Amino acid sequence: MAEYILGISCYYHDSAACILKDGELIAAGEEERFMREKHYSGFPHNSVRYCLNEARINANEVDYIVFYEKPFVKFNRIIETYVSQWPRSFKAFKRAVPLWLKSRLNMRKEISEELVVDPENIYFSEHHLSHMASSYFLSPFDEAAILTIDGVGEWTTTTIGYGKGTELTVEKQMKFPHSIGLLYSALTSYLGFQVNDAEWKVMGLAPYGQPRYVDKFLELVDIKEDGSFRMKMDFFSYHYSANESINSKFEQLFGKPRRKKDEKIDQFYTDVAASGQKIVEDLIVGIASNLHRESGLDNLVIAGGVALNSVANWRILEKTGFKDLFIQPAAGDSGCALGAALAFHHLSLNHPRKFQMKHAYWGPDFENEEIEAVLKAYNASYKRFDDEQLIDETAKMLAEDKCIGWFQGRMEFGPRGLGNRSILANPKNPNMKDIVNSKVKFREEFRPFAPSVTKEEASNYFDLKIESPYMLLIPQVLPEKRDLLPAITHVDGSARLQTVDSKTNSRFHSLLSAFKQKAGIPVLLNTSFNVRGEPIVCTPMDAYSCYMRTGIDALVIGNFILTEKDPEEEKKFNMLNAQFIQRDEGLYKPNEGF
């Protein structure tokens, strides 16, 4: 009999679920994609249902259900912290405690009732153990150093450890409130961006500035020789407030109040972004360098939300002595669902390793018949092509500077569109970055776009040391290629790169190769298929809606191409802009039974 393990992450942000069959990943999905609510934190009903459907089982056929952290330990941290900060923590205490007493402390009962399963089959992993397992057990390494950095789990904010075979060892940990992730959240908040959503903006803004305020950040953090550090908590408020990361003393230190949400970003705030990014990179590199010295290992795996800081990852590869690096695509809390399941499989059940993650495509896919049914329901104008014609026609449109919505195969797991739910464009056009930002993504002009390139030709265009399949490394564009690739070369000459392997995504690889035949380069601008404020598209309906509400020139969905928009239909969809998107009839309806 096959053994099934369901992993679940929820109730903080980025809820998700995954399922393992005999230790191999079958499916994984993030609830925000189904619910069309970015960073959705509720129970992942639809993600669980999708995973069970892919495994072709019911919930009561799952052998083990594993939650990604230990709620009672987390509650203990919340209570202990708020009591120590009394009375200024009163509002946060009043908000948090009733919620925990009502349901979170009896999470086994909560999950049992949500899934209608035996509570005896429900288990719990530690948050940072889930992160560690999510990266190491999926890596190609038999032995590796492990670095986990995030905001906070139960108590832990940073973990240093090792993986060997099926064993994980924790060597050192840093505890709340001393946190690189929460320092970056404080920086994000000060710059007027939304915490736990807009950290990407800080990373994109930083290269436009100069690190003129590093000395100010050094007044916030006491850094030790071994890379460890202590936050100077007089400047922060996240340890006593549920809504704020920084206080007035932080603002006084920098001499200006935090930027208002819609206020212009002047050079001061740009320089603060550069300074904060540099300090965070220095902290991470310091910890990783010490880990390399102590371990003597060549391989490093990284996990936790901070592992999505692609610039810091590249600096680790350049500065610490590690020769190879693995970061799985859902390095944040959504990936903890996967890590919890893997930790239980290997550490609790003592099963050997036999699965290695080689791609990110673990979400739903749709047959041409399902896609066509949606297009017909909306009276869409479309043409159907065979595989070779589809690639050729799409490459031709891209070479003609058309902006393409590209919807193919299984949806990605993790925050990046990696060639299955992507918006694609010609990187040779110097105006394309502004066109996609203003007409399609509706986002800030300073934010860069990433390139995708065939794996075998990556080194001809980028100064790349290892493969980068998940857009989690930012190498330099080769100086002689920067004029050729203006739309994806950031102001500092870097690019957040995806290398595309024909073995893991043959259709996207074929498109890149066809584009080379028409435009001379196997590189495309690739950004996630969504608009500002919405999750990446999941279903054909999501893709069609995004196409109709934006300046996307053509939608390539399955074997169909759409290039014409009915003005009346376009008007209807524009009325839905920035609102809840209607779901596909009959697909993943929320809150149904299992």
Image (cartoon, helix red, strand yellow):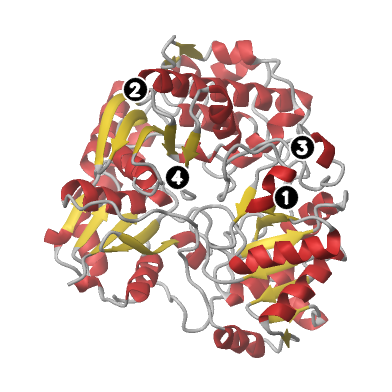
Secondary structure at numbered mark 1: loop
Which residue in the protein does label 4 denote?
332
Residue located at (52% from left, 33% from top)? 185
Asked if disc 3 and disc 4 are in contact, CB closer than 8 Å, the reply is no
Q: Position of residue 83 (x, y in %)?
A: 28, 26
Three-letter amino acid code at disc 1?
A: Arg
Q: Earlier in the sequence, mark 1 or mark 2?
A: 2
Numbered circle sitting on residue 443: 1
Distance between mark 1 and mark 2 Cα atoms = 38 Å
Residue farthest left in this picture: 120
Q: Earlier in the sequence, mark 3 or mark 2?
A: 2
Q: Earlier in the sequence, mark 3 or mark 4?
A: 4
Three-letter amino acid code at disc 4?
A: Gly
Q: Say left or right for 361 vs 555.
A: left
Three-letter amino acid code at disc 3?
A: Leu
Numbered circle sitting on residue 85: 2
Foreground tag (3 vs 4) = 3
Which residue in the protein does label 3 denote?
478
- Crowd class of label 2 (few under 14; some 14 to 19; many from 20; radius 10 Å): some
Asked if disc 1 and disc 4 are in contact, CB closer than 8 Å, the reply is no
Q: Can residue 343 be seen here?
A: yes
Choose between 88 and 252: the one closer to the eye. 252
Q: Can residue 403 be seen here?
A: no
Foreground tag (3 vs 1) = 3
Q: Which quadrant: the N terminus? A: bottom left
Residue located at (23% from left, 49% from top)? 346
Foreground tag (1 vs 4) = 4
Secondary structure at numbered mark 4: loop
Three-letter amino acid code at disc 2?
A: Gln
Q: Which quadrant: the C terminus? A: bottom left
Distance between mark 3 and mark 2 Cα atoms = 51 Å
